[in-house]
């Protein structure tokens, strides 16, 4: 774990980090709508729910809850509507933040916009001598965001017309203690065992946040509720959740890098 914590506690390494967060919502807000619009995938979900979550398989309240609380974590049953990424740079000796929010109803637009950034970073890294890739940083990105992006890239492979960005590919071979990927879910363990929610870390350290962070299922539920009356507000809500999470991770790493 030495390399990981060398990166975390080093005052300069933070300038070479790409902070990001991927926020999905369920493709279909209800099982009833899911079944009506995509019966083959609905059956796939039913099988998964039966084998993994021991849920009911008819369109009733309990089955809906099992669906809302679990399907959101699968790229096969959810779509990305917002991605936020950020970097830290020096200006007049002071650390400044650059943050970019990507949000759209069209999942491919969101993904393609972020992938272009990753393609450019990958190209710059390959052309540099020696090669230097930015460190990917976020909360639970090893289990969620990175595999989510890769699977979605595979889904849209024909539309992308390019290989998976190298910066994502190489992250699959990086050990948790090596340089290249920093997941604050693992960082905050400090070799312990507990998985601590980012919201708790934020409150514990008194980090600034625009809104309280919600679970993915809560974000998806509120998104679909807002979509009934105001689509623009629904997108803004998810984008704000994504931006807030990215900003909290950035603040956490900024704090640790100065210790």
Image (spheres, helix red, strand yellow):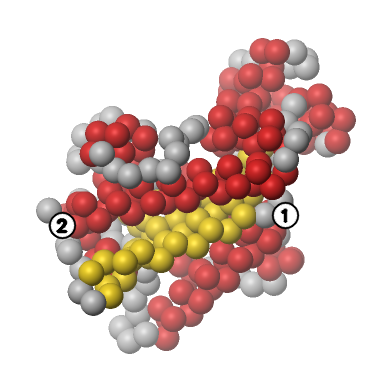
Q: Is residue 45 visible?
A: yes
Which corner quadrant of the image does residue 134 belong to?
Answer: bottom left
Q: Residue 156 at x, y = what percent?
A: 70, 59
Q: Is residue 154 visible?
A: no
Q: Residue 233 at x, y = what percent?
A: 65, 43
**Could you tell me which secondary element the residue under label 1 belongs to?**
loop
Above or below for 32 versus 132 = above
Left or right side of 77 for 3: left
Tag 1 residue: 106
Left or right side of 166 for 57: right
Q: Residue at x 36, y 64 (%)?
A: 97
Above or below for 242 versus 89 = above
Q: Residue at x 70, y 25 (%)?
A: 47
Q: Give the numbered dot on residue 258.
A: 2
Q: Return the residue nearer the eye: 249 or 95.
A: 95
Q: Return the residue nearer the eye: 26 or 123.
A: 26
Which corner quadrant of the image does residue 8 belong to?
Answer: bottom left
Q: Residue 128 at x, y = what percent?
A: 37, 85
Q: Return the residue nearer the eye: 164 or 194.
A: 194
Q: Give the numbered dot on residue 158.
A: none
Mark 2 burial class by Cα count in 10 Å: few <14, some 14-19, many 20+: few
Q: Residue at x 25, y 56 (%)?
A: 254
Left or right side of 145 for 6: left
């Amino acid at each position: 774990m030495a390399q990981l914590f060398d990166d975390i506690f080093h005052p300069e390494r933070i300038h070479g980090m790409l902070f990001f967060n991927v926020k999905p919502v369920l493709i279909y807000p209800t099982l009833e709508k899911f079944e009506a619009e995509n019966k083959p995938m609905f059956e796939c979900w039913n099988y998964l729910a039966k084998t993994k979550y021991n849920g009911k398989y008819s369109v009733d309240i309990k089955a809906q809850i099992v669906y809302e609380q679990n399907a959101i974590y699968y790229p096969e049953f959810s779509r990305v509507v917002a991605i936020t990424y950020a970097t830290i740079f020096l200006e007049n000796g002071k650390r400044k933040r650059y943050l970019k929010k990507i949000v759209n109803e069209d999942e491919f637009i969101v993904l393609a916009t972020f992938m272009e950034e990753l393609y450019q970073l990958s190209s710059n890294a390959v052309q540099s001598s020696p090669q230097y890739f930015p460190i990917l940083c976020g909360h639970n990105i090893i289990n969620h965001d990175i595999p989510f992006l890769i699977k979605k890239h595979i889904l849209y492979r024909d539309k992308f017309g390019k290989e998976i960005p190298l910066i994502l590919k190489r992250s699959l071979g990086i050990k948790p203690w090596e340089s290249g990927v920093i997941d604050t879910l693992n960082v905050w363990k400090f070799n312990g065992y507990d998985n601590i929610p980012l919201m708790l870390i934020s409150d514990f350290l008194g980090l600034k946040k625009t809104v309280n962070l919600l679970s993915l299922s809560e974000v998806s539920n509120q998104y679909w509720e807002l979509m009934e009356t105001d689509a623009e507000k629904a997108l803004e809500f998810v984008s704000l959740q994504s931006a807030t999470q990215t900003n909290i991770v950035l603040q956490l790493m900024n704090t640790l890098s100065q210790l």
